[in-house]
Image (cartoon, rainbow, N blue to C red):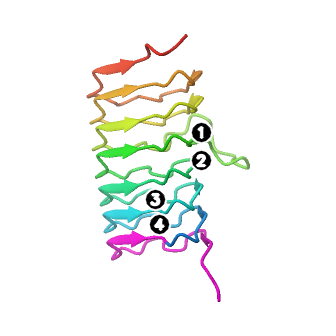
Amino acid sequence: RYYVTEIDNHAFQGCETIESVVIPNTVTEIKRYAFYCCNSLTSIIIPDSVTRIGDWAFSGCTGLEEIQLPESLKRIDYQAFKDCSSLKEIILPAGVTSLGVKPSNSIMDAHMVGGVFSGCSALERINLPEGISSIENNTFFGCASLKEIQLPQSVTKIGDSAFSGCTALTELDVSNFN
């Protein structure tokens, strides 16, 4: 018997009629561009077996309204949710320690627009768990509906344009910093 253990690169890229996805608990990684530009995708359930969401995995899923991230998740890579313009809230599990780091073999300009949640224009709320050490460049670029964010004490770096274009941001709580 065979089991799916990863959703590979470009697996469902551009499948514009997929509306919802339930990933089996045998999958440990969702790779690059796996669901890129699946515009009709509105919800996805990711099982506790998944530890990594790859670069651009859900980027351009403009219909994505909700996503349940598992407690097992450790890493969300570069631009994973870029331009998910219907996503209003995301709860990051406590185990996430890496958020939006560019691919190690990347030749992209360090100031290129597009962090992990950039362009998520409907995003109002996000929790950042203790353990995340940096808010990378452009992480929340263009999140025009983001109203408030509390940065955990573990954050030691806020990158270029991390909150640029967050025009609704009225409260940035850094009181946990030493």
Residue where numbered disc 3 is placed? 58
Q: Amino acid at mark 2?
A: Lys
Tell me the CA gap for discs 2 and 1.
6 Å
Residue where numbered disc 1 is placed? 97
Above or below — where is 17 with respect to 75? below
In front: label 4 or label 2: 2
Above or below — where is 178 with respect to 69? above
Of pointers 4 and 2, the one earlier in the residue sequence: 4
Tell me the CA gap for discs 2 and 3.
17 Å
Of pointers 1 and 4, the one earlier in the residue sequence: 4
Residue 74 tag number: 2
Determine contact: label 1, label 4, CB under 8 Å. Answer: no
Q: Is residue 14 magenta?
A: yes
Q: Is most of the magenta stretch helix, strand or loop?
A: loop
Any part of residue 1 in sight:
yes
Q: Secondary structure at mark 2?
A: loop
Number of other residues with Cα within 10 Å of mark 2, as a class: few under 14, some 14 to 19, many 20 or more = some
Q: Secondary structure at mark 4?
A: loop
Residue at point 38%, 56% (across, down): 67
Determine contact: label 4, label 3, CB under 8 Å. Answer: yes
Above or below — where is 49 with respect to 149? below
Tell me the CA gap for discs 4 and 2.
19 Å
Q: Amino acid at mark 1?
A: Thr
Residue where numbered disc 4 is placed? 35
Determine contact: label 4, label 2, CB under 8 Å. Answer: no
Judge left or right: residue 166 versus residue 25.
left
